[in-house]
């Protein structure tokens, strides 16, 4: 079915790497917020995995989200219609139909009822006031004329005469047929009863008719033709039913996305953590600028007051190389940027006090994988293969988030690879945050291009700020 | 009128071809040169490819020339090639019609199929005449003359008459059936112009975007179902004159020889099927060249194994080789294991084999004298009840007795079933016989000393990198053998060195 209306305005066209949502910890958030609503969470992730890269679409989606915020019962109203629609979906499996007419009856009655519901659906939106044009200007074509034509098919429950247009193969073999009408344009000249009467009177039979009185072979073939026609009608009515079913299923899934977003927002607000509607800045040379950005995943394991937020600015460079103390908050910083950006490009809020960002064409995450599933090629090969597979998401400018990449070889070789990779990121017009312990890489950042060095302020402050890479990170202290 | 052929220049070659079916030398060559892999690939693109023609290269100069010219014209012009492909598909339709004429029992239905066949036949002849107009090759120019002759033979105005009759029948067949099950009758009328199904389909697409299809199959498996019989009778009663005309048309033209044209389909497919295959590989970057028949020198530039190309699919994975030898030369290929010796021999063999058909060969250039016989002798599994050497010698004997001056003989790893000294002597005996015949021969062997002992032999060596890696270059170069097989690196990569095998024995069970 051609989509004419979408609560999401349009499907997001940006890409994210296969493991991005996992790497950024969305599943941890899911455990905390959606423990009782798994399918809602699954649907939420589906939308997050297709970020929006078009400014107009994103702004409209933000307005739709705000409309859902202002009208919290809207989701329930949509849900009610979707649930009612379910009653009329066709499910012939397990049903026994005595005749094809019974089957047609079942298909028609359900589909006509479903079309009635479809026609009623716009009433949902008339109860509310909206700022978004998607919701405020919702229109759909009425199904009346289609219902009228379908209702005519109900006459086939009885033995109403029908006509089929036929085509022939070579040798006068029938090839195909299709329903042409339900009332013969000309009255048949004689009935079987008349025929018998005429036969008795020795009168001539009409020459333009084939009689199949009694259970003869002609009757059987004609009956097969009729059965095929009714089954074909059922199939087409089923297609109509499926089209409406898809409509309601899509609306339901799209409304569920906003429902999940509202749940997440309530969770954050209950925790007393800040959130904001991001400001989208697509000007050339822009980047991410945020104040008080934090890692939402930590809310699942830490008290809100223990969560440390950070600021971020890409003013001095688009490649941020983050070094510093072990357990100093580098990965947390990386995740907080990733989560906010994913939520922002879904048309939702950012987990920050202030958040301004461009719309990236792709978001790539490259975190170490837990297990070596490279079948003997080694972990470095696995890392590089994964990177190569995902790198295309940066096409046209994206955001790349690296966490301790290329540590499975010597530091010199790892740095060389890292420099090459970041040069490629830079050349693709993308931005990056690269968390690393590779000092050679951090110190050779002039080879890469527009880079900024960030470092942990101290071992236990979890604050990240601009600064030269630390020579000693006190790793032994951790022993 | 005798049927025309673009595959056989004379009847003798055609009857030779029929006699050679099942011939040992050809089936061995097809297997050894991996021609079956090529056929399998061709059949993926042209399922009806007549492979039996490819299995037996014609050893007739005139036929080779006829095929060569036809292949050259089809290969050289995409327009001609596409037209001939369309011609083959028209002939397929004609064949189907002819099958129906035989199969269908009802007289009127048979007559209708006959009419369809006549229309297809006339259309195909006219098309053939049009596409072969001004053809340069003997084969296609001959087809033009043949089509003109067949058209002349067909009754004047046959096509127009058939078209008119078909027009009347089509008009009669534009039907709606009104079925009234209460009244138990079916009535025919002119097709509904605005059927209900169209209305519903348009509305469903406009409102919901749903695409509907109200057409359903009314086909049944019987000859003519009772309903179809009744419909036919009804139509006949209403259009008696049309059916009489149809019957008359059949009676007057039933002796028309459709197969004079249908038989050409396989011959056309032989060329179009093969050229379709090489076009696909040319697109992937492989080179093919039209073979040239010359006297004296065999010149091959960048020949490669096309069956390997089929398997690997990428030209950068294939190494091509070049060489120049004289007719009557024996070249011995020795050198590195898995270094490309057999592949080189097979490449050369494939070029000779395909050139004998006049077809483009896997090379950038291939010139060779006329080949009047070809035989291959590759390793085979042992036959029960015979020693390996005995079996080999039997095959060698048969090849040498069939070979003549313009033969090409290819031997791969002969006489490995005996001691090296004996094998060298046996090989030399074979060489003597081949030299006396004046045949051209390729001989792949590990017995490098053969080339050192007899200065008449041309020595080629499969090379490996001159470093510790001993990586194969798959290059075959003309030089004296050095006696190195570079087997150690393969043993290492296979885990079959002494230390590795020993380590295997030391693992805990």
Image: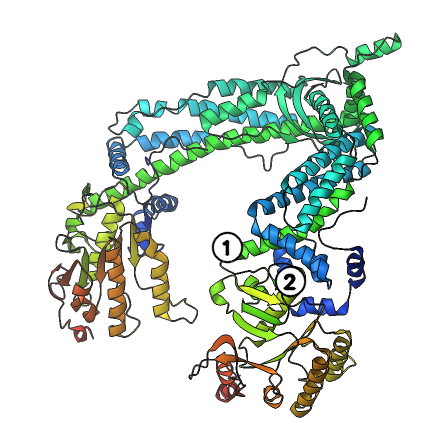
Tell me the quarter of the picture where residue B393 sits: bottom right
Whole-percent x, y for residue B80 in the image: 60, 45
Query: What residue is rendered at 61% in x and 57% in y?
Result: B41
Q: Residues within 10 Å of mark 1 (few under 14, many from 20)?
A: few
- The lab-note entry on whether marks 1 and 2 share a chain reads yes
Q: Residue at x 32, y 52 (%)?
A: A393
Q: Is residue B144 above or below residue B44?
A: above
Q: Secondary structure at mark 2?
A: helix
On the picture, is B100 further left or further right than A16? right
| Dot 1 and dot 2 residues touching (CB under 8 Å) | no
Disc number for residue B354: 2
Give whichever of A48, B75 is nearer the camera.
Answer: B75
The residue to which callout 1 is attached is B283
Answer with mark 1 or mark 2, whichever residue precedes in sequence.
1
Assign the N terminus of chain B to one quadrant of the image. Answer: top right
Query: Which residue corresponds to the image point at 77% horizontal and 66% vertical from the top-left?
Result: B23
Label 1 or label 2, whichever lies nearer to me, is 2
Whether residue A90 sits left or right of residue B171 in the image: it is left
Image x and y of residue A131, in percent: 24, 28
């Amino acid at each position: 079915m051609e989509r004419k209306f979408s609560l999401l305005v349009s499907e997001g066209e940006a890409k994210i790497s296969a493991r991005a949502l996992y790497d950024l910890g969305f599943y941890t958030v899911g455990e905390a917020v959606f423990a009782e609503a798994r399918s809602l969470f699954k649907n939420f992730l589906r939308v997050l995995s297709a970020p929006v890269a078009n400014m107009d679409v994103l702004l409209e989606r933000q307005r739709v989200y705000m409309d859902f915020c202002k009208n919290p019962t809207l989701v329930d109203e949509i849900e009610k219609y979707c649930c009612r629609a379910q009653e009329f979906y066709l499910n012939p499996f397990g049903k026994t139909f005595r005749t094809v007419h019974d089957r047609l009856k079942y298909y028609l009655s359900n589909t006509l009822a479903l079309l009635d519901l479809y026609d009623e659906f716009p009433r949902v939106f008339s109860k509310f006031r909206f700022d978004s044009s998607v919701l405020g200007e919702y229109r759909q074509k009425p199904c009346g004329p289609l219902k009228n034509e379908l209702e005519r098919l109900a006459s086939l429950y009885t033995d109403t005469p029908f006509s089929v247009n036929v085509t022939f193969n070579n040798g006068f073999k029938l090839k195909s047929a299709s329903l042409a009408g339900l009332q013969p344009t000309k009255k048949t000249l004689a009935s079987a009863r008349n025929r018998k009467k005429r036969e008795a009177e020795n009168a001539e039979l009409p020459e333009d008719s084939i009689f199949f009185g009694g259970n003869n072979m002609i009757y059987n073939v004609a009956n097969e033709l009729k059965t095929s026609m009714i089954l074909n009608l059922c199939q087409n009515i089923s297609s109509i039913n499926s089209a409406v079913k898809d409509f309601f299923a899509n609306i339901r899934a799209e409304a569920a996305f906003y429902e999940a977003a509202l749940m997440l927002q309530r969770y954050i607000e209950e925790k007393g953590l800040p959130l904001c509607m991001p400001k989208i800045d697509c000007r050339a040379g822009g980047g991410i600028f945020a104040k008080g950005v934090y890692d939402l995943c930590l809310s699942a394991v830490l008290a809100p007051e223990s969560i440390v937020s950070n600021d971020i600015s890409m003013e001095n460079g688009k490649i941020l190389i983050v070094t510093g103390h072990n357990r100093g908050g580098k990965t947390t910083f990386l995740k907080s940027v990733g989560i906010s950006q994913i939520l922002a490009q879904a048309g939702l809020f950012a987990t920050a006090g202030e958040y301004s960002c461009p719309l990236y064409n792709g978001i790539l995450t490259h975190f170490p994988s837990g297990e070596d599933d490279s079948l003997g090629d080694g972990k470095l090969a696995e890392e590089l293969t994964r990177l190569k597979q995902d790198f295309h998401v940066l096409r046209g400018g994206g955001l790349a988030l690296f966490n301790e990449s290329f540590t499975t070889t010597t530091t010199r070789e790892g740095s060389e690879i890292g420099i090459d990779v970041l040069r490629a990121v830079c050349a693709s017009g993308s931005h990056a945050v690269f968390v690393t312990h590779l000092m050679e890489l951090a110190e050779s950042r002039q080879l890469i291009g527009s880079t900024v060095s960030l470092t942990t302020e101290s071992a236990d402050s979890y604050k990240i700020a601009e600064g030269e890479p630390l020579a000693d990170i006190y790793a032994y202290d951790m022993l | 009128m005798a049927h025309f052929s673009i595959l056989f220049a004379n009847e003798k070659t055609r009857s030779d071809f029929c006699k050679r079916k099942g011939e040992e030398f050809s089936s061995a060559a097809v297997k050894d040169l991996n021609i079956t892999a090529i056929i399998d690939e061709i059949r993926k693109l042209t399922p009806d490819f007549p492979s039996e023609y490819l299995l037996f290269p014609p050893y007739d100069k005139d036929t080779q020339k006829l095929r060569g010219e036809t292949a050259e014209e089809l290969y050289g012009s995409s327009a001609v090639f596409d037209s001939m492909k369309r011609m083959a598909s028209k002939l397929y339709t004609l064949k189907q019609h002819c099958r129906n004429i035989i199969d269908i029992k009802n007289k009127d239905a048979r007559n209708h199929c006959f009419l369809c066949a006549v229309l297809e036949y006339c259309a195909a002849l006219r098309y053939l005449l049009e596409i072969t107009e001004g053809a340069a090759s003997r084969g296609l120019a001959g087809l033009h003359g043949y089509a003109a002759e067949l058209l002349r033979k067909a009754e004047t105005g046959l096509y127009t008459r058939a078209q008119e009759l078909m027009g009347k029948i089509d008009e009669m067949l534009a039907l709606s059936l009104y079925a009234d099950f209460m009244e138990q009758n079916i009535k025919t009328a002119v097709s509904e112009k605005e059927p209900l199904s169209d209305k519903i389909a348009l509305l469903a697409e406009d409102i919901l975007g749903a695409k509907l299809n109200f057409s359903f199959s009314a086909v049944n498996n019987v000859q003519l179902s009772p309903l179809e019989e009744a419909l036919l009778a009804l139509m006949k009663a209403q259009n008696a004159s049309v059916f009489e005309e149809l019957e008359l048309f059949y009676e007057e033209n039933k002796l028309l020889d459709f197969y004079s044209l249908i038989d050409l389909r396989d011959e056309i497919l032989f060329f179009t099927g093969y050229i379709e295959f090489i076009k696909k590989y040319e697109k992937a970057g492989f080179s093919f060249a039209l073979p040239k028949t010359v006297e004296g020198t065999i010149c091959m530039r960048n020949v490669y194994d096309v069956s390997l190309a089929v398997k690997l699919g990428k030209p950068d994975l294939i190494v091509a080789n070049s060489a120049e030898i004289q007719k009557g030369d024996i070249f011995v290929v020795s050198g590195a294991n898995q270094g490309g010796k057999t592949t080189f021999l097979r490449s050369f063999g494939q070029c000779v084999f395909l050139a004998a058909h006049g077809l483009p060969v896997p090379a950038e250039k291939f010139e060779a004298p006329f080949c009047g016989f070809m035989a291959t002798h590759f390793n085979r599994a042992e036959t029960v009840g015979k020693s390996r050497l005995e079996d080999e010698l039997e095959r060698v004997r048969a090849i040498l007795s069939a070979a003549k001056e313009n033969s090409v003989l290819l031997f791969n790893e002969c006489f490995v079933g005996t001691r090296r000294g004996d094998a060298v002597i046996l090989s030399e005996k074979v060489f003597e016989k081949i030299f006396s015949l004046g045949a051209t021969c390729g001989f792949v062997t590990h017995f490098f000393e053969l080339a050192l002992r007899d200065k008449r032999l041309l020595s080629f060596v499969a090379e490996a990198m001159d470093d510790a890696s001993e990586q194969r270059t798959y290059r075959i170069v003309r030089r004296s053998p050095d006696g190195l097989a570079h087997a150690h690196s393969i043993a290492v990569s296979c885990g079959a060195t002494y230390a590795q095998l020993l380590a295997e024995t030391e693992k805990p069970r």
